[in-house]
Image (tube, helix red, strand yellow):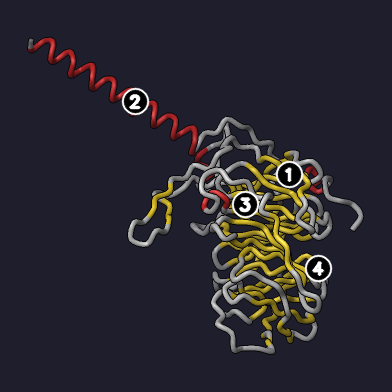
Amino acid sequence: MKRKFLWLLLTGISAIAIVVFLFGTSQEIIHHRNNFVRRFSDQVAQTCEADLKFNSFYFAGAANGQLYLGNFTAPLRLAKIDTALKTIRKQTIVLDRLDLPFRSVEIHIQNSYFFVTDGTVPCVFRGKLDLLKANWLDSKLPASFSHIQIIDSNSAAYTTSDRNGESILGMTHLGEGAGSTTNPLLLQKQIDGNFDLDGTLQYDAIAKKLVYVYLYRNQFIVSNPDLSLDYSGNTIDTISKAQIRIVKISSSGDQKLAAPPLIVNKTAATSRGLLFVNSALIGKYEQEKLWDQAKVIDVYDLKDGSYVASFYIYHIGKQKMRSFYVSGNMVYALIGEHIVGYRLTPMITKHFIKNE
């Protein structure tokens, strides 16, 4: 009897060990070793760097050979910096209304105009870059919005929620004759229509395309400025369904994530017909040690969604890239308190739209 019990115990322990091993292996595959292979460009060359002294800056845009940075802790301060990162000039924006409950101010640059937005008010201001005075614009914006992208001087795209709390894309005209429209069919729900649709919205003014990149799955959507679908594309990794678990809070009825989700595509940028995606997943044959030293950016051609190449952006000490911006044949990264410029290689730039 003892021998039988011991045999059953050992069998049970072995079975549990096998299950644990298989689970760990599957988690390693899902989280670390996806079955895809990147094609690396020659490493982009760092050409310039500047110390901004603070880590609260973000990319507002570029115009007239200058980069513009907003500052989360000084919402109406705008930093103008030349593309060689040699000269920084800080300016202050003046709004014609300050009586609004601002909570999430962002600055956006579009050609000779700048825009000040706040999705919690909601509101949009517009002004000329050479004057830095902005006027409040009439608009038919929803009660709240996020990820706003300026299409031109009179229109913008954004994400918002429908009456069921599910995320949708919208577009609004600004100023006289203001009006808005939404397309609830662009974003494709997998689980709850909220968390599973998290992502980033970009606009490529040269290709004249809006691009929505999902945060938790290997998919992006390319649409026209009127929100008509062009096509759905895929990033090169293998996570086709959002790996998230949601629980409902009984006291309030609200939902929240039960555990940290698996992030697939962290941040993105577009430029001249190319999509640049900061992927969070390591590919096959890549050294894990290198991922402790750098972030990877994958590049796609927006004409057909095809994969072009990848390159690394290296950390500065323990400080990692938190966002990036592409202008001309340069990619700029905010790393800690630094802004760093890198020159893209011909392997990538040959795919740019040639005629602006």
User: Left or right of 282: which side holds 3?
Assistant: left
Decide if residue 91 is in sight here: yes
Give the residue at x 12% y 15%. 5
- Disc with the residue nearer the chain's start (3 vs 1): 1
* Label 2 packing within 10 angstroms: few (<14), some (14-19), many (20+): few
Name the foreground residue: 245 vs 67. Answer: 245
Please state which of the two labelled residues, at mark 4 or mark 1, is closer to the viewer: 4
Question: Residue 289: where, in percent of width, then height?
Answer: 50, 41
Label 3 belongs to which residue? Answer: 313
- Tag 1's secondary structure? strand
Task: Report the label total.
Answer: 4
Label 2 belongs to which residue? Answer: 19
Q: Amino acid at mark 3?
A: Ile
Decide if residue 84 is in sight here: no
* Image disc number at residue 152: 4
* Label 1 packing within 10 angstroms: few (<14), some (14-19), many (20+): many
Name the foreground residue: 318 vs 324. Answer: 324
Q: Amino acid at mark 2?
A: Val
Mark 3 → mark 1, Cα distance in angstroms: 17 Å
Name the foreground residue: 112 vs 331. Answer: 112
Q: From the viewer's perspective, is residue 176 above or below residue 196?
A: below
Toward which corner of the image does residue 155 lie, by quadrant? Answer: bottom right
Label 1 belongs to which residue? Answer: 300
Q: Amino acid at mark 1?
A: Tyr
Give the residue at x 75% y 41%. 305
- Tag 3's secondary structure? strand
Asked if labels 1 and 3 touch by Cβ distance under 8 angstroms, the answer is: no
Mark 2 → mark 4, Cα distance in angstroms: 56 Å
Asked if labels 2 and 1 touch by Cβ distance under 8 angstroms, the answer is: no
Question: Residue 35: where, in percent of width, then height?
Answer: 57, 30
